[in-house]
Amino acid sequence: MFKKTKKTLSLLIVMSIVMSLFAGVATATTNTTFGSGFANVTVGNNRTAGQITATEREDASWGVDANSIFLEVRLPEGVTFNTRPDRLNLANYFTAALATDVTFEAASDNMLRVRLTPNTGAFRSSGTFSFAADGLSRLNIAAGVTGNIAATVDVHRIVGGTVHWVESATLPIARVAPRAVTVTGEAATLVQMGNNRLAARINIQEGAAGSLMATEVLRFEIVTEGVTFAAPEALRETGIDVGVFTIAADGRSASSAVTTSSSVFAGRVELTPRLNVNPGVTGDIRIRVRGSAVGATDTAVTTTTLTVATIGTAAVEITGATNTGGTVHAGRVAGEVGATTADDARFNLRATGGNVLPNDRIVVLELRNAKFEASAAPFGIEWRAGTGAWSTLSRTITRFDEDRKAWFGTDTLPETATEIRIRDIRVAVDADAVAGDLSVAVSGTIGATGTVVIGRIARAFTATSVATNLTYPGLNQSAGNIVITEAARGTIKAGTYTVNLPEGVAFNDSTVKPRVRVTAGDLRVTETPTISGRVLTFTVTGTSSEASTITIDRLNVDVARAAMEGNLAVGIRALGAEWQLTIPVVTPTSTANLATAVIGRIGDAVVGRASVFTIGALSFTRDGVSTPIDAPPVIVAGRTLLPLRFAALAVGVSADNILWDPVRRTVTLIGDRVVQLQIGSTSMLINGIAVPLEVAPTISGGRTMLPIRALATALRADIVWDGTARTVTVTPR
């Protein structure tokens, strides 16, 4: 309890001291109440101080006799009035309230005495000595005076030559703080050569009011060669007034004069300079700040040299990606990417830390699974400074690498630019692009690297079939029906479409004509297609208002000896203004297929043939025949991995339908579905839809190893594991 009481008492004492320093002081005697207010000052002449007041404590405490109250103020040693008071300027030193007959009695350099008649009614008289009149009642404070300046006030009641009483109080009217001005700087900015480069802010802070005197000059001098001042970004002051920022003829120095000094509170000046930086300048840019004295008085500014900027390149980040929910369909002609036609996808390149972007660099954009529109402006470029309005940046955009990449320079970028925006991006997506994110990779010398998603790639339609077994060779054999399913309403456009067979296989309509029908939705098609060897052609005559389905049936094919064993896959292509192909293309190696479907299996990939693999063995068995393999099956994380070519064969995919991309490290297998796996990835794409994997494909001993159970599930094969024999049996359906 004692400790708590003692702590509370200490707190009250501290609070009372603080209040006495900052809120003025009051005291009372029998007949008079005294009070004062003070100001923070520095030594020197004509300093503004506070005031001191004497007031009747009660009604008629000073009596009712005429001319009976005398008030006298005395200043301490080392402090004098700026001008000695006299009867002509008395109003600048003393004022009375509810009193009459105020008369000047006497004065010296540090004393003033007045006389008055107190109020005779029910009101209390008072008198106030003030020390704030410029050139008059302000104070001259000698060097060496420190701390509180306390004035003494006496109140005399004299009647008929007899002193009835005298009451006094000594109260603070000013507090002397040493003159001090400190100079600091914010973190240096990164700048490049050029004009009007933004430097770090310089802060000039008074330690006490009046430390910077009127007409004192603040001087700024650039130390680094090859750099000059430009008009500043900002010159701000608080509690003090300074003049304009004046740049010298050579641009290497500048100044600003103090026009009105601070009085009660310490003042502050903030300068944010802009600089012209010549070519060849390297390293830090430094500015020296100092004060210029007034008359015989020394400046209180501590001369300081600051690093306000550094030559270099600001880090640039990719940010602000918006309107990225748009879908672009594989194989379509170039169009704008965006959530809607009005809301184009866009993203920004922004210099970090409030710095400006370099205007001597290049920006490279690379599309994945797509190409930029073959035009002079496949995307728009805008710029802004800070949070200002966006403006168009006119730049030449150069496309290269088969239009998959484009670059532009920043040499015309304004020197104040902090951010670039890429918008109105027009792309054409490859017909065989994998469904998923449509992304742009950013590189070049701008300083930003990374990938930003601007939309999504989807197929306009998919194709499926139930494969039939085909003899090798054989004529007029029945193949599976083809079902074409529209991804959404309107994604299949009016125009000509072709179904294309590979080399060695041709359509046969000698006995039964193929048929094309809309089996769901409201698309319109020509029901009787035309046949020309390996190409079946049909026409869509309108667009749908609901997602539709087209079925092509009554398909017969001739299989020649030139045909490849394995899955017989057809490719479906589109011709016309809406699609990238504008003329019929029948070359089977073309990558322009918008969808594929396996309509049959030829020869060695006949449905129902089982393949048996033994863990660790360098051969597998099919129909009792042992065939060597180039890498043994292995178990990883409880899952069996088989060599790529033999895993594909086991699930019914022939060698010509295995596509390996060494750049992207992806494997694409074309069966009745299109399956894509990527080395090291724990997901695979089945007709463009991501499906998780329990174990990722890998490369072992130079051979690509695939998880057979996931692959069999994707391509609808049966799989049986024998834990005792450590074998896996794969049977295509």
Image (spheres, grey):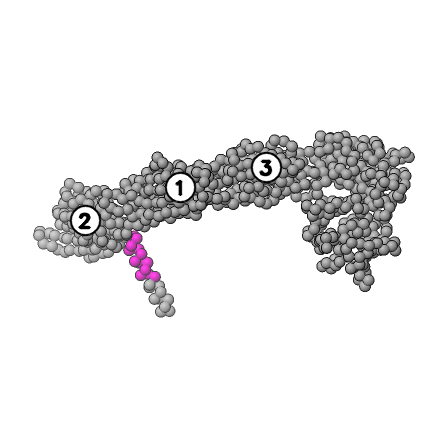
Q: Nearer the viewer, mark 3 or mark 2?
A: 3
**Which one is in front, 55 or 21?**
21
Which is more N-terminal, label 2 or label 3?
A: 2
Amino acid at circle 2: Thr
Q: Would you name the residue on which mark 1 appears?
A: 225
Q: Residue at x 31, y 47 (%)?
A: 301
* Secondary element at tag 2: strand
Residue 461: x and y, percent? Answer: 74, 39
Residue 612 painted magenta: no
Q: Earlier in the sequence, mark 1 or mark 2?
A: 2
- Of residue 528 and residue 473, the one placed in the foreground of this image is 473
Instruction: Find the magenta span and give its range.
Output: 11-23
Chief SS of the magenta region: helix
**Was residue 18 drawn as part of the magenta stretch in this picture?**
yes
Q: Determine contact: label 3, label 2, CB under 8 Å.
A: no
Q: Position of residue 277 (x, y in %)?
A: 43, 39
Q: Secondary structure at mark 3?
A: strand
Tell which of 281 and 477 is nearer to you. 281
- Counting residues from the start of the chain, the first of labels 3 and 1 encountered is 1
Q: Are marks 3 and 1 in contact (CB under 8 Å)?
A: no
Q: Nearer the viewer, residue 149 or 709?
A: 709
Judge whether residue 130 can be spotted in this image.
no
The image quarter containing residue 395 is top right
From the image, tell me which residue sits under label 3.
407
Q: Which mark is residue 458?
A: none
Q: Are marks 1 and 2 in contact (CB under 8 Å)?
A: no
